[in-house]
Amino acid sequence: DTAVSQTPKYLVTQMGNDKSIKCEQNLGHDTMYWYKQDSKKFLKIMFSYNNKELIINETVPNRFSPKSPDKAHLNLHINSLELGDSAVYFCASSDGGGGSYNEQFFGPGTRLTVL
Amino acid sequence: AQSVTQLGSHVSVSEGALVLLRCNYSSSVPPYLFWYVQYPNQGLQLLLKYTSAATLVKGINGFEAEFKKSETSFHLTKPSAHMSDAAEYFCAVRSGSARQLTFGSGTQLTVLP
């Protein structure tokens, strides 16, 4: 019973392509997140949705567009992929989006390689 | 504003030795603090969290951390390292009504036989 799942686990693509990463959580949480982990393992928040509403939108290129069809899903679409987009992308979820001390549960990650 | 500093990007200990991973935070309001572990090619897993209930927090796998407000620290310790503890460890802070966690840069723990 995977709590937070992501597909695909690995994604290798050419520069300029458009790709999507899917995330699903079965924990009943109301908040979901996307993080980017670079080659030095630094983790940075990209987006967060609470009850399908965007609540965090850090400074990321417009080529990245999150979509939340329902509370259990948060997908990440990336247009015109660039070499610098190569990283591991993590989806996470938590119960409560504002001021909550509830921990975030992370998916296994999607390793994106742009050639 | 909130931030986290993890001193030492790499820490090596011998099996059976004390593990000490350092974390200092900056927060204008009382923070919530977390330690996560990341094993190779996996996602992050919560080790423990501080939510102001008790300053000494016990987590999974024998880890614990002590919140020291005067030192703005939340160091992670384990009395005796196991080979299976080798991983990347992240400290994170969430301040007051902030909607997001801010992570430190991580500490790679190596356990030597």
Image: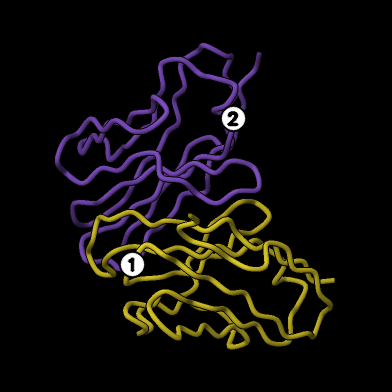
Chain colours: A yellow, B purple
Q: Is residue B106 above or below residue B87?
A: below
Q: Residue B4: where, in percent of width, then height?
A: 40, 49
* Image quadrant in which you'd find residue B62: top left
Label 2 neighbourhood size at 10 Å, few (<14), some (14-19), many (20+)?
many
B44 or A7: which is nearer to us?
A: A7
Determine the chain carrying the residue at label 2.
B
Q: Foreground mark, 2 or 1?
A: 1
* Image quadrant in which you'd find residue A53: bottom left
Q: Secondary structure at mark 2?
A: loop
In the displayed orientation, state which residue is furthest to the front. Answer: A1
Counting every numbered tag in the picture gives 2
- Which residue corresponds to the image point at 69% horizontal and 72% vertical from the top-left? A85
Q: Quadrant of the C terminus of chain B?
A: top right
Mark 1 sits on what residue? A28
Say which amino acid is labelled 2.
Ala
Say which amino acid is labelled 1.
Gly
Marks 2 and 1, how far apart at CA:
32 Å
In the displayed structure image, the side of residue B29 where residue B15 appears, left or right: right
B36 or B74: which is nearer to us?
A: B36
Which label number is shown at residue B86? 2
Q: Residue A48: where, in percent of width, then height?
A: 41, 74
| Same subunit, tags 2 and 1 | no
Q: Residue B79: where, in percent of width, then height?
A: 41, 16
- Which residue corresponds to the image point at 74% horizontal and 68% vertical from the top-left? A11
- Which residue corresponds to the image point at 42% horizontal and 33% vertical from the top-left? B22
